[in-house]
Image: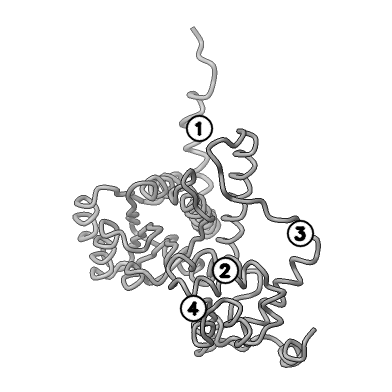
């Protein structure tokens, strides 16, 4: 261990961000890199990719050393550290050392996410399963549970909930709406942008509006969320880009993660996986908060559909 790394450890845990917000834990670092890398400049991507690929090696480097290794500047290294959620490079190095220690504790080596055209179907299954697991782990590691709890509280008390999503995100919106309906709450999913806006104007304080957009910049989802925000509804964004335009109209932001994409694995696959995890977390939290009414509602819905799952008699 170098003197620089010893100095980092002697100072204890990483300092918090300005304003008292703690820097991300080491377990969340890899998830942060995968989530934010696509929106970085190419030079910042080189830094992020280097620390994700070799946390132990990079933890032993000074800011100058990492800049030389990645062919960038010291300023770029510091900007990358801050974008990843650390006050400075020293705090990033501490997280890298922690991540390296976790990796050396016996975790299985990674499986490549790339799927080739001629891959056997067994390999496709293994690679997709690995990516799905990684996406779920990354989303769980990066999910702000304080924001999640606030969203659950708002949903549990809402007079009505509107959920906006188009494309694959629209399917996730429908999933959440159906879940909330099953526990007796009033919820509507909107994939038609015109219908979404005309419904949003009916919202008011005490209602909830949720926008689901992986890119964070889907206009057909942002517009109704803006209208709901202006009407006083509590607004929630489920997005893979927490710094995207959707965030300016969101009271609460729930960040999703995605696996590395390839030609045969489009973004809609991995983003859907992480979005569904967040939806399940919301639903479970709301069910806990409203259990006295949710449990009878679930039982009633099961009973209403029971005959459809029984063999028909002639």
- Residue 124 lies in what quarter of the image? top right
Name the residue: 27% across, 70% down. 232
Judging depth in this view, the residue of 186 and 97 nearest the camera is 97
Above or below, comparing residue 280 to residue 182 in the picture: below
Q: Position of residue 223 (x, y in %)?
A: 24, 62
Residue toward you, 132 or 296: 132
**Residue at horizontal 43 percent and vertical 45 percent from the top:** 175
| Residue marked by disc 3 | 107
Query: Between 165 and 64, which is closer to the camera in this rendering?
Result: 64
Residue picked out by circle 1:
303
SS at mark 4?
helix
Do the numbered discs 2 and 4 sit on residues whose CB atoms are within 8 Å?
no
Question: Looking at the picture, how far across and down is residue 37, in whole percent?
Answer: 49, 67
Q: Would you identify the image quadrant in which residue 125 lies?
A: top right
Q: Is residue 20 in view? A: yes
Q: Which residue is mark 2?
A: 49
* Left or right: residue 185 compared with residue 148: left
Q: Residue at x 50, y 71 (%)?
A: 45
Question: Is residue 290 at least partly visible in the picture?
Answer: no
Whether residue 279 is situated above or below residue 171 in the rendered picture: below
* Residue under pointer 4: 83
Q: CA distance from mark 1 to mark 4?
A: 50 Å
Q: Nearer the viewer, residue 215 or 196?
A: 215
Q: Position of residue 73 (x, y in %)?
A: 51, 85
Foreground disc of the pair 2, 4: 2
């Amino acid at each position: 261990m170098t003197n620089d790394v010893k100095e980092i450890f002697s100072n204890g845990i990483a300092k918090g961000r300005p304003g008292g917000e703690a820097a991300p834990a080491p377990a969340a670092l890899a998830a942060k890199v995968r989530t934010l890398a696509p929106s970085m400049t190419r030079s910042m991507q080189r830094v992020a990719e280097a620390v994700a690929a070799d946390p132990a090696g990079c933890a032993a480097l000074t800011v100058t050393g990492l800049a030389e290794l990645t062919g960038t500047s010291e300023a770029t290294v510091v900007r990358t550290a801050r974008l990843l959620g650390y006050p400075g490079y020293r705090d990033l190095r501490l997280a890298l050392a922690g991540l390296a220690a976790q990796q050396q504790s016996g975790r299985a080596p990674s499986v490549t996410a790339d799927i080739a055209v001629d891959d056997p179907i067994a390999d496709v299954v293994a690679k997709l399963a690995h990516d799905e697991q990684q996406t779920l782990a990354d989303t769980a590691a990066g999910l702000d549970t304080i924001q999640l709890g606030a969203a659950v509280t708002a949903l549990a008390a809402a007079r009505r909930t509107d959920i906006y999503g188009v494309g694959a995100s629209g399917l996730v919106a429908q999933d959440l709406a159906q879940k909330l309906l099953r526990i007796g709450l009033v919820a509507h999913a909107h994939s038609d942008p015109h219908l979404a806006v005309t419904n949003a104007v009916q919202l008011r304080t005490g209602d909830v509006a949720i926008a689901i957009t992986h890119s964070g910049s889907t206009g057909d989802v942002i517009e109704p969320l803006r209208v709901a925000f202006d009407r006083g509804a509590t607004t929630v964004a489920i997005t893979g880009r927490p710094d995207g335009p959707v965030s300016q109209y969101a009271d609460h932001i729930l960040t999703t993660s995605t696996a590395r994409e390839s030609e045969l694995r489009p973004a809609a696959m991995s983003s859907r996986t992480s979005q569904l995890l967040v939806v399940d977390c919301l639903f479970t939290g709301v069910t806990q908060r409203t259990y006295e009414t949710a449990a009878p509602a679930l039982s009633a819905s099961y009973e209403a559909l029971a005959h459809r799952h029984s063999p028909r008699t002639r």
